[in-house]
Image (tube, rainbow, N blue to C red):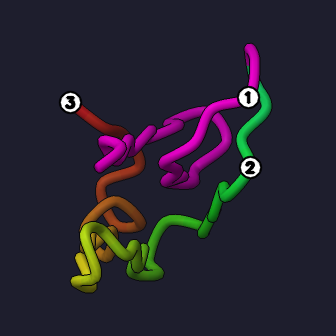
Amino acid sequence: MAPAYVVIGSEARSCAGYRHPIRAETCADAVEVPFGVDLLLTVAGREVVVRAGGFSEAGEVG
């Protein structure tokens, strides 16, 4: 099973998830959503939800 990665981009104000990196900055199955929208990933046949709703109000991550 490949690991899942989540990247939170405060400048782009988005969250991205992927499992199969091809090379730097390129992934076979990348999913990106803006802050305020939940990120849905499938890991080992199970749906994982990253709730990004709080980021939209905060304006920053960390």
Where residue 14 appears, as percent x and y from the top left, is 57, 54
- Which residue position holds label 1? 22
Where residue 17 appears, as percent x and y from the top left, is 49, 54
Which of marks 2 and 3 precedes in the sequence? 2
**Residue at 58%, 50% in the rendered image:** 13
**Residue at 36%, 44% in the rendered image:** 2
Q: Is residue 56 magenta?
A: no
Which of marks 3 and 1 precedes in the sequence? 1
The stretch of residues the image draws in magenta is 1-24
Q: Do residues under tags 3 and 2 come within 8 Å of each other at their CB atoms? A: no
**Secondary structure beneath disc 1?**
strand
**Residue at 31%, 76% in the rendered image:** 53
36 relative to 18, above or below: below
Report how far apart the C-alphas of labels 1 and 3 lie in the structure.
28 Å
- With 26 as the anchor, is 14 left or right in this view? left
Amino acid type, mark 2: Ala
Of circles 3 and 2, which is in front?
Answer: 2
Which of marks 1 and 2 precedes in the sequence? 1
Q: Residues within 10 Å of mark 2 (few under 14, many from 20)?
A: few
Nearer to me, 44 or 50: 44
Amino acid type, mark 1: Ile
- Which residue position holds label 2? 28
The mark found on residue 62 in the picture is: 3
Of circles 1 and 3, which is in front?
Answer: 1
Q: Do residues under tags 2 and 1 come within 8 Å of each other at their CB atoms? A: yes
- With 22 as the anchor, is 49 left or right in this view? left
- With 39 as the anchor, is 28 left or right in this view? right
